[in-house]
Amino acid sequence: LEIGIEFVVMRENARELPEALRWATAKGVTFAIVSHLLPYEKEHQESVAYETNSEEALDFFKPWQERAAREGIDLHRFFKVMLNYLRSPDDQRVVDFVWEMQMEARSRDLFFNLKNLLQRDEEWFGEISAIFAEAQTVARETGLDLRLPAIIPKSYRSCDFVEKGSAFISWDGGVHNCYFLWHQFSCYSSKSKKYVVPRVFGHLAENSLRDIWNNQLFRDYRLEVLRREYPVCSNCNLVPCEYTYNENFEQDCYAGTVACGDCFWNMGLFRCLQ
């Protein structure tokens, strides 16, 4: 038997993490799970401590941002002039530059959200990285088993729930595929309200867990998740879109039927029940 704690990190409490871990280990705690905040209310969006741009998007954007600075192109103007029919030569340079950038990203099958990249809080992400590094130092000094979330979404996404053979049983005996889809709720993501409807593959009152696990619908769903053929919704310039922010999810823009494109667990940001 081990004693552990979970710490939900936000901008308001992130600086308390290292000291909270020291306090916990002094009380006999042997492991700690740290996860980011999932905003359930609109006003909580500003408390989110994680980055929304993927590692791949950040690496892709940096040389383009440097080139724009060298060429005197103000990328912030793109959103003001992109829909203008009549453009000045300077405005056209901005539009052409962004179009060229988008074409290269498309050729590499890469998603990036230009507005999010331009609004990135460099100072904060430097600070949260230092806080996590200090937390890791505390863990090494005390022998604490520390499980930190990513700060920047992983480019290579994976679902621990499906890959490790998990099934989630709800209060009414419903069998679900992952933590994200085992209860109904609404939250805020990409500055918009998102509705989450549970995905149910059977009920224990009607069938055994083995039979539900092996039914064709559940097997096909897990195989589709494992193929990882879904978009990176948080890094798309069209987010939020009706595909993923509709009250009843049916498919994504790739015509996939799994809701993984807008899941923050598979990007390493949330660690609940992992």
Image (spheres, rainbow, N blue to C red):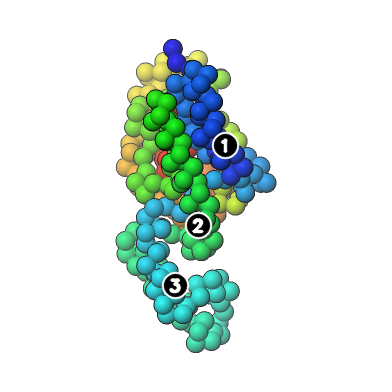
Residue designated by label 3: 98
For the N terminus, the image quarter is top left
Is 187 placed left or right of 114 in the picture? right
Gap between marks 2 and 3, in whole Å?
22 Å
Residue designated by label 2: 122
Residue at figure coordinates x 52%, y 43% from the top left: 249
Is residue 152 depicted above or below 26 in this figure? below
Gap between marks 3 and 1, in whole Å?
40 Å
Amino acid residing under circle 1: Glu
Residue designated by label 1: 16
Q: Measuring from the top left, give residue 163's x and y in whole percent.
A: 34, 32
- Of residue 207 and residue 213, the one placed in the foreground of this image is 213
- Foreground mark, 2 or 3? 2
Q: Quadrant of residue 38?
A: top right
Q: Mark 1 and mark 2 in contact? Answer it, CB < 8 Å.
A: no
Q: Quadrant of residue 59?
A: bottom left
Mark 2 neighbour density, 10 Å: few (under 14) some (14–19) many (20 or more): few
- Of residue 144 and residue 222, the one placed in the foreground of this image is 144
Gap between marks 1 and 2, in whole Å?
20 Å
For the C terminus, the image quarter is top left
Label whose residue precedes the other's in the sequence (2 or 3): 3
